[in-house]
Image (spheres, rainbow, N blue to C red):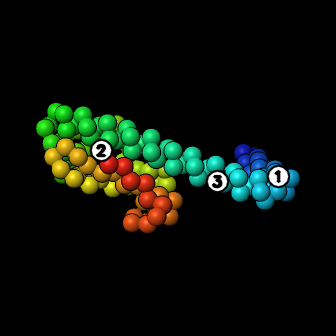
């Protein structure tokens, strides 16, 4: 019971500190922080896509052709990198040819085929 009470007080203190920070920092600072956070998510997604592409390129070098799908790729190989973007959505894989493929993140809006998609051809 004492631990629950302590946790409640700790959470309330965190909320108060947050609101004091927002009041002091002002709207512009909050908007700037949100933009930095969004940019960081994009950079993290691009780094993850790059790692995933290296694993697929290694697969191509050993198998002689690109996998038909990420499901096929995972079945034949333990994939140490995530197939998720920084927003928690699955990265789409498209096989373009025996040696070429495309990775697509749905971006911040979580929907494919919109202007904020992150598309990388390899």
Q: Are marks 3 and 2 in contact (CB under 8 Å)?
A: no
Residue at the disc numbered 3: 35
Instruction: Please determine whether, in this image, residue 104 is positioned above or below residue 62.
Output: below
The numbered mark, 3 or 1, whose residue comes first in the sequence reads 1
Q: x, y (%) of residue 102?
A: 30, 51
Residue sitting at x 73%, y 48%: 7
Q: Nearer the viewer, mark 2 or mark 1?
A: 2
Residue at the disc numbered 1: 25
Answer yes or no: is residue 49 visible.
Answer: yes
* 101 relative to 29 in the view: left or right: left
Mark pair 3, 2: CA separation: 28 Å
Circle 1 — which element? helix
Q: x, y (%) of residue 50?
A: 38, 40
Residue sitting at x 33%, y 56%: 92
Among all residues in the image, which is located at the extreme left? Answer: 64
* 33 relative to 100 in the view: left or right: right
Instruction: Please determine whether, in this image, residue 60 is positioned above or below residue 42.
Output: above
How busy is the neighbourhood of tag 3: few (under 14 within 10 Å), some, or many (20 plus)? few
Circle 2 — which element? loop
* 31 relative to 83 in the view: left or right: right
Answer yes or no: is residue 9 visible.
Answer: no
Q: Nearer the viewer, mark 3 or mark 1?
A: 3
The numbered mark, 2 or 1, whose residue comes first in the sequence reads 1
Residue at the disc numbered 2: 122
Mark pair 3, 1: CA separation: 15 Å
Mark pair 2, 1: CA separation: 43 Å
Q: x, y (%) of residue 85?
A: 44, 51
How busy is the neighbourhood of tag 2: few (under 14 within 10 Å), some, or many (20 plus)? some
Residue sitting at x 71%, y 57%: 31
Residue nearest the observer in this picture, 86 or 98: 98
The numbered mark, 3 or 2, whose residue comes first in the sequence reads 3
Instruction: Please determine whether, in this image, residue 102 is positioned above or below residue 80.
Output: below
């Amino acid at each position: 019971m004492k631990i629950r009470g302590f946790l409640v007080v700790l959470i309330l203190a965190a909320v108060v500190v947050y609101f004091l920070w927002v009041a002091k920092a002002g709207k512009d600072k909050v908007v700037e922080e949100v933009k930095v956070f969004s940019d960081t998510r994009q950079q993290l997604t691009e780094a993850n896509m790059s790692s995933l592409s290296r694993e697929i390129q290694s697969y191509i070098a050993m198998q002689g052709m690109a996998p038909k799908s990420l499901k096929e790729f995972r079945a034949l190989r333990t994939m140490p990198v995530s197939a998720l973007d920084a927003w928690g959505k699955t990265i789409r894989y498209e096989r373009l040819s025996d040696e070429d493929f495309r990775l697509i993140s749905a971006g911040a809006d979580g929907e494919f085929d919109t202007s904020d998609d992150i598309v990388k051809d390899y």
